[in-house]
Image: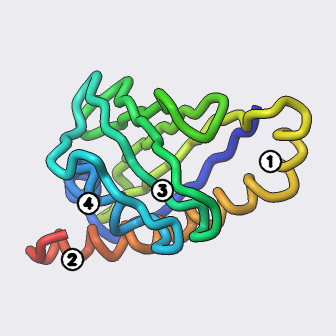
Amino acid sequence: MGRFEVRIPIRAPREILWAVHQHPSVLLRITPKILGVRLDDPDACLSPGACFTIRLMSYGILPGFAWETVIEEHVPPDQFVDTQGRGPFACWRHTHRFLPEGAGSVLIEQVEYRCPFGWVGGMVDRLVIEHLLRAMFRKRGRVLERLAIEASKGSTP
């Protein structure tokens, strides 16, 4: 099972960062464009038990796939947890924790996942997937900070 944690300092209050996360459409802005992300239900909202489907193009090379996301836990403004109902991984659990820190906040992204295809998937994970996921989450952090700062200044995120 792969597991990693990314700690992202954000120069905006926790409540603002939480608010930016409350609509799944934020995924369209924080996911690298090369993945070609689309939401099947652009009006979906985060709440316990909510389920929505994300469509991705595999780095613009392979055919796209659907990723069904289920919100397992939603505790404003502390954390929410999403899991994969259907999708590319054998299992996926993503915890988003929001902590106040001084005048800003910290977003802690914890991901536990398992690649499909047994030992072959484990090898691909160690060689490729883990590095791609870490890089994607670092980029997401930079975009989220920008969106939270814009929202704290009264701009629409």
Pinpoint residue 134: horizontal percent, then vertical percent. 66, 59
**Residue 2 lies in what quarter of the image?**
top right
- Residue at the spot 74% in from the left edge and 54% down from the top edge: 129
Q: Is residue 59 left or right of residue 19?
A: right
Q: Where residue 35 sits: x, y (%)?
A: 51, 66
Image location (x, y in percent) of residue 5: 62, 47
Q: Earlier in the sequence, mark 1 or mark 2?
A: 1
Which of the two labelled residues, at mark 1 and mark 3, occupies the earlier sequence position? 3
Residues packed near mark 2 inside 10 Å, few (<14), some (14 to 19) or many (20 plus): some
Residue at the far front in the pictured view: 63
Q: Which residue is mark 2?
A: 150
The residue at which mark 1 appears reads as: 125
The answer to whether residue 56 is above or below residue 91 is below
Q: Residues under labels 4 and 1: Cα distance?
A: 35 Å
**Element assignment for label 3:** strand
In-image side of 123 versus 92 (left or right) = right
The residue that disc 3 covers is: 56
Task: Tell me the SS state at disc 4.
Answer: loop
Quadrant of the frame with the N terminus:
top right
Asked if the residue at tag 2 contacts the one at tag 1, i.e. Cβ–Cβ closer than 8 Å, the answer is no
Q: Amino acid at mark 2?
A: Glu
Amino acid carrying mark 4 in the image: Pro
- Taking the spot 29% from the left edge, 59% from the top edge, the residue there is 26
Comes first in the chain, label 2 or label 3: 3
Residue closest to the eye, 6 or 93? 93
Q: Earlier in the sequence, mark 4 or mark 1?
A: 4
Estimate how packed mark 3 is, as few (under 14), some (14 to 19) or many (20 or more) residues with alpha carbons within 10 Å: many
For numbered disc 1, what is the local secondary structure?
A: helix
Residue 90 appears in which quarter of the rendering?
top right
> Circle 4 sits on which residue?
13
